[in-house]
Image: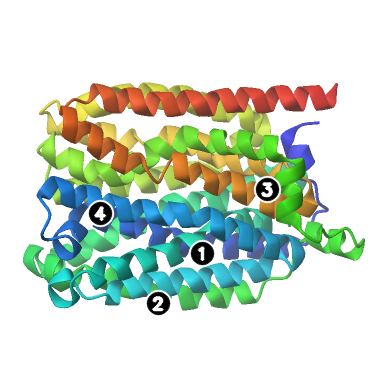
Amino acid sequence: MSVTQTVSSPSGPRTSVRRAVAASTAGSTIEWYDFLLYGVVAAIVLPTVYFPESSAFAGILLSFSTFFVGFVARPLGAVVFGHLGDRVGRKKALVVTLMLMGVGTVGIGLIPGYDTIGVLAPLLLVLMRVLQGFGVGGEWSGAVLVAGESGRSTRQALLTSFPQASAMLGTSLATASVLVVGAVAGPEAFIDWAWRIPFLASAVLVVLGLWMRTGLTETTTFSEVRSRGKLERAPVVTAVRSHWREILLGMFLKVGEMAPVFIFVSFIYTYGKQAGGLSQNTLLISVAVAALISAVLTPVMGHLGDRLGPIRVYLIGAAAMAVEVLVYFPAISSGNQGVAVGVILVSLIPYALMFANEATILTGLFPPQVRYSGSSLAFNLAGIIGGGPAPLIASALYGATGSWALLSAYLLLAVLVGAAAALLIRRRNQLKEA
């Protein structure tokens, strides 16, 4: 049985499917905007505002440490919202995750700096980052399940690739907002107060997302499970007890693209300035355009996954990512601005091939009764070893050695881990079909 076939559900009315895809994609874009906006500002502003008594290098490390905190909180959100999504419904879980993310993001925009309230400032920053992580920990599975469980099983990769594209849409929106606010306010005002505007603007976006999501109906797959009385009393416990191998495979699959992408959209602001001599605006524009290119290509790669098989397309992306991580750092530090910008612009294309097909691969590992819980745990546990520590590890490696070689080796190892997990999942599926 193929992965896409394991996520089967009757075809709903076309307008209902379109609305489900649109609402899940729009809401996820807002949540990823909130979550990834922090990564942009962590490299540019937070060391000065919340860690002013540290050296420049230590301030960057501390700033990326608070970035990591959000990833630590994500598995907790996966547990809570996995239970809610498998017991009460996908839709209700998604409404709550969006509300939590909004509170955390607006809260970050309201926290005074270290000069005003002292050590309480970074402590509150960590608390708001935990709320963000908790919310986004339940977001991903809910969004892709609302899209995927409302349409035909033969179009799973395409349907779920739209909410998958929201990660890069959110990145592009977050980066563009920082660029625009910085250009209007000026460098000094941006560091002083204007950086808060993109965080506070999230309140408007969250209201829009809630309006779209509250009108959704429950997915056909969950409704069928509930009508047959097949709901699990403790879906998270069942997922961990009976599907721990699938959780581990999904986690390692996710690491393959997660470590590189958070280097490409966060650590680049440190490395690009220090090693490449690129201006902040050049980096912001380059990353925003790269993220937009990736977002546009993601549904294309999802459609390709339905045609060729999602694991095959993921592995093609992994091969392209391996090449990317080997040339990325030397190209940026080459001193040639055209080469540096060029490699940034294409850096997220391999990610699109991998990420577009992850949703159908990961959710296909689990039966409907524990699908929200199992896929959420796999997705968010990867953040602890993949995405969350990546900028912190990269900063430490580069700060200690000043060499790009270790950075490339670190990311290449992550890509190989993801490719190995994909091959094991394909072997698992072949054995089930035999």
Depth-wise, is mark 3 or mark 2 nearer the camera?
3
Contact between labelled residues 3 and 1, with CB atoms less than 8 Å apart: no
Please name whichever residue, 301 or 240, is drawn nearer the observer in this view of the structure: 240
Q: In the image, 391: left or right of 207?
A: left
Using residue 345 as the reference point, say whether residue 251 is left or right of it: right
Q: Which residue is mark 1?
A: 135
Amino acid at dot 3: Gly
Is there any visible trace of residue 179 in the rendered image?
Answer: yes
Q: Which residue is mark 4?
A: 63
Q: Secondary structure at mark 1?
A: helix
Marks 4 and 1, the one that precedes in the sequence:
4
User: Which of the 4 quarters of the picture holds residue 12?
Assistant: bottom right
Q: Marks 1/3: CA distance? A: 17 Å
Q: Which mark is residue 203?
A: 2
List the residue tagged with mark 3: 374
In the rendered structure, are the residues bearing label 4 and label 2 in contact, judged by CB atoms less than 8 Å apart? no
Residue type at the position of mark 2 = Ala
Residue 97 image point, x, y percent: 55, 67
